[in-house]
Amino acid sequence: FIACSYHNMGESMMSLKANGFEVKNIITWNKSNAMPNLTRRVLTHSTEFIIWAVKGKGWVFNYEVLKDLNPEVTKDGKKKQLRDVWQIPLCQGKERLKEKNGKALHPTQKPEELLKRIILGFSNENDIILDPFAGSGTTPYIAKKYNRNFIAIEKEKKYIKAIEQRISTEDNNLFNFTSCPKIN
């Protein structure tokens, strides 16, 4: 999965295809509470795209789980297939990680509901989830919550500290955080 804006979606798609990946879906994340556009020179950006690509034949698609996660129902109350447009608000309230001064810790913190759908819908318990740009740690937090293993990579110390706090448990032996040397 690659989360991107229209600015870098083309390059992401080309790179995936050049490296043998097959794009299965492009999910449109419709941010119901998008930030206003302060420039007043373009339309407000209220969507982000999530490219789902696979390689080989062993990929996971938990159809029934995704139906269960779908907040929409049919007229008679039955579960519906999850579509490729997800209406999920930006992080706010208790979910939003903040610095001591009250400002948002990370500018692009992903909502837990977004990662819940991805992790539960496209992996199984005990699978390994890789997030090479872990940021505020939503991916490892949700992976741990739903019994997935994870590898989280992040270079910014303040975000690493936030991730450690977010996923810490009484049994701290479950997680091994190591610092990697900076690569130029």
Image (cartoon, rainbow, N blue to C red):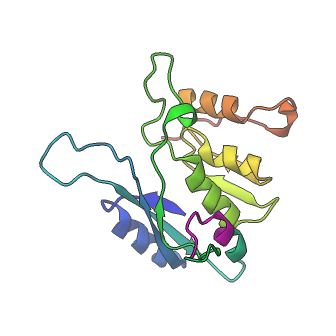
Residue 168 lies within the magenta run: no
Magenta stretch in the rendered image: 66-74
Residue 70 lies within the magenta run: yes
Residue 130: x %, y % from top left: 65, 55
Q: Nearer the viewer, residue 166 or 15?
A: 166
Most extreme residue toward the top is 101
How many numbered discs sit on the rendered protein? 0
Residue 65: x %, y % from top left: 71, 69
Residue under the image location 54 percent in, 47 percent down: 111
Residue under the image location 68 percent in, 67 percent down: 68
Most extreme residue toward the bottom is 57
Identify the image quadrant of the N terminus. Answer: bottom right
Q: Nearer the viewer, residue 165 or 41?
A: 41
Most extreme residue toward the left is 41
- When the figure is inspected, residue 145 is found, relative to residue 56, above or below; the finding is above
Query: Which quadrant of the figure has residue 165?
Result: top right
Q: Is residue 106 left or right of residue 172?
A: left
Q: Nearer the viewer, residue 4 or 110?
A: 110
Residue under the image location 34 percent in, 69 percent down: 10
Q: Is residue 60 visible?
A: no
- When the figure is inspected, residue 77 is found, relative to residue 37, above or below; the finding is below
Residue under the image location 59 percent in, 47 percent down: 112
Residue 83: x %, y % from top left: 51, 74
Residue 86: x %, y % from top left: 48, 63
- When the figure is inspected, residue 153 is found, relative to residue 127, above or below; the finding is above
- When the figure is inspected, residue 102 is found, relative to residue 114, above or below; the finding is above
Q: Is residue 125 left or right of residue 34?
A: right
Most extreme residue toward the front is 76
Q: Is residue 167 visible?
A: yes
